[in-house]
Image: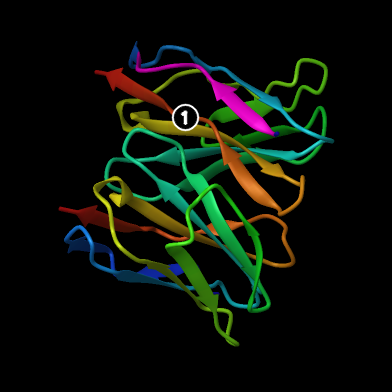
């Protein structure tokens, strides 16, 4: 079945450092891909998305490119801030049977001042 | 446009009890999906309702059940609560099975 694998955390960075969180997927067809962010005690917030190969999603300085050849959707940010500290989830919208989201296990990011 | 809302925000139940969680879909959305997010994990698909009928189910036992109403709002019912049911329950609505919009979640604690 469809699945998402993302890098284990926690990831600890200093403010203004470069961020990469790796995400790879296995799916039938070409699903839409998403990154969600979750702050402590809160629900999910959509960070960015890409609906087809080579699309680049971007928001608030975060970017991710849909790479069909490597089945990847890595999240990047050039300069992180303390306020970016949160858990980040990679997800795909599976179209195998019922349309449903398949999430990775999440990567906790901690940014130090 | 009103987003997806869920109630209650938090609740505490005792093992063996029953619980009902509620979700109001975003205006114009006819599909509701429910997810369970255990602590430290990604959300897991429970089931989906489309036009008041169950439209798919994840790997959850029958004591997890649901309803969707004519106004497309939805309920998630869990019977015979177990300690492992403690989690954040997320509702998501969409139009015709496409991109889903998540609510803020209900945090359930079972003691």
Other-residue count near label 1 (Cα within 10 Å), few / some / many at <14 / 14–19 / ≥20:
many
Q: Position of residue A1 (x, y in %)?
A: 70, 34
Vertical side of B15 occupied by A70: above or below: above
Q: Position of residue B5 (x, y in %)?
A: 43, 69
Q: In percent of the image, x 33 and y 29: which residue is there?
A: A85
Question: What kind of colouring is applied to the model shown?
Answer: rainbow
Asked where in the image residue A66 lies, by quadrant, the reply is top right
Of residues A3 and A49, the one nearer the viewer is A3
Q: Is residue B93 left or right of residue B90?
A: right
Of residues B38 and A16, the one nearer the viewer is B38
The residue that disc 1 covers is A105
Q: Position of residue A47 (x, y in %)?
A: 53, 41
Q: In percent of the image, x 82 and y 35: which residue is there?
A: A30
Vertical side of A3 occupied by B35: above or below: below
Chain at numbered mark 1:
A
Count the numbered circles shown.
1
A42 within the magenta span: no
- Which quarter of the rendered picture does the C terminus of chain A lie within? top left
Q: In percent of the image, x 77 and y 22: which residue is there?
A: A67
Of residues A33 and A19, the one nearer the viewer is A33
Q: Position of residue A56 (x, y in %)?
A: 72, 31
| Furthest residue toward bottom | B70
Q: In percent of the image, x 58 and y 79: which residue is there?
A: B72
Vertical side of B1 occupied by A42: above or below: above
Magenta-highlighted residues: A2-11
Label 1: element kind: loop
């Amino acid at each position: 079945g469809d699945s998402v694998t993302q890098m284990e955390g926690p990831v600890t960075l200093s403010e203004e450092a470069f961020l990469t969180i790796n995400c790879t997927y296995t799916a039938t067809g070409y699903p839409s891909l998403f990154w969600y962010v979750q702050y402590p005690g809160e629900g999910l917030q959509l960070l960015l998305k890409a609906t087809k190969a080579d699309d680049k999603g971007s928001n608030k300085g975060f970017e991710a490119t849909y790479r069909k050849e490597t089945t990847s959707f890595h999240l990047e940010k050039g300069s992180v801030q303390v306020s970016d500290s949160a858990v980040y989830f990679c997800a795909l919208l599976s179209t195998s049977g019922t349309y449903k989201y398949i999430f990775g296990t999440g990567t906790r990011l901690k940014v130090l001042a | 446009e009103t987003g997806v809302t869920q109630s209650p925000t938090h609740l505490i139940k005792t093992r063996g009890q029953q619980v009902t969680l509620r979700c109001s879909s975003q205006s114009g959305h006819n599909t509701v999906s429910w997810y369970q997010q255990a602590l430290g994990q990604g959300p897991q698909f429970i089931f989906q309702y489309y036009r008041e009928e169950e439209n798919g189910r994840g790997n959850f036992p029958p004591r997890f059940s649901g309803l969707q109403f004519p106004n497309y709002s939805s309920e998630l019912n869990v019977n015979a609560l177990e300690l492992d049911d403690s989690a954040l329950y997320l509702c998501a609505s969409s139009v015709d099975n496409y991109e889903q919009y998540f609510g803020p979640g209900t945090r359930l604690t079972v003691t």
